[in-house]
Image (tube, rainbow, N blue to C red):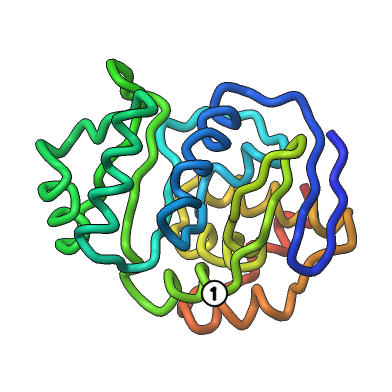
Amino acid sequence: MKIDISNDEIKLKKETNIIDEFVIDICKILAKHFNYVIVSGYLSILFGKIRGTEDIDVFIKKTDLQTFKKFYNELKQKGYVIFNARSDKDAYDMLTKKIAPRIAKKDEFIPNVELQFPKDKWGLQSLKEKIRVELNGDEFFISSIEMNIAFKIYLGSRKDIDDACYLYLLFKKLRHLNEKKIREICSQLDVSPNILEMCKNE
């Protein structure tokens, strides 16, 4: 795996897996209709961590029903379904009620995208500060590494802490990590960033 980083872009070359290919394909559709950002667990997989996941978490900027219908129709044309909604309006209503529609290939459930409108200022900030990733020539957008690490600490499960440590150690080694920003976000989330000290000792 080869990683080249600038302030707002990461160029990545690697052998892709099934989840990577799914993300690339679905993001080509998302990009036509929405301002979007990928957050949470997929990021550690993207950067080489070997672990399973069923879903890819995506925030999209709030939009109207007509725009969502166009997206829904293109999903169907490209062989995707929203398997926990009965119609385009049903899926849109779920979004407005903070319930995530799940997108997958027809007749498949894994992997899938959990689509959400931002629920708070952090979701909005993720969209505002998103990072462009170019993976073997294909592009999509992810949340900042610092925000992802801080939120993994906030979530606090063993898997989340492992993800936080993996990203922290990797980007620390690449000399491209703003630890002050991680600590500032942790402070606002009212969680201790001391887990980073444990990561350093792994």
Residue 51's quadrant in the figure?
A: top right
Question: For this view, does 124 lie left or right of residue 9?
Answer: left
Question: x%, y% of residue 119?
Answer: 31, 69
Q: Who is closer to the viewer here, 75 or 153?
A: 75
Q: Residue at x 76, y 73 (%)?
A: 178
Q: Where is mark 1, residue-wise?
A: 128
Q: Residue at x 89, y 62 (%)?
A: 175
What is the x, y in percent for residue 163? 60, 47
Q: Between 27 and 116, which is closer to the camera in this rendering?
A: 27
Q: Secondary structure at mark 1?
A: helix
Classify 87 as above or below 95.
Answer: above
Residue 34 against residue 71 in the figure, above or below: below
Of the pair 22 and 192, the residue shown nearer to us: 22
**Which residue is drawn at the image coordinates 58% and 61% (left, top)?**
143
Left or right: where does residue 122 sit relative to residue 134?
A: left
Amino acid type of the residue that numbered disc 1 sits on in the rendered structure: Lys
How many badges with numbers are in the image?
1
If the image is split into quadrants, where does the N terminus sit? top right
Q: Residues within 10 Å of mark 1 (few under 14, many from 20)?
A: some
| Relative horizontal placement of residue 157, taking residue 116 as reference (left or right) | right
**Eyeballing the image, is 80 above or below 121?**
above
The residue closer to the viewer here, 63 or 153, is 63
Query: Which residue: 56% across, 78% down?
Result: 185
User: Horizontal and vertical percent for residue 191?
Assistant: 50, 74
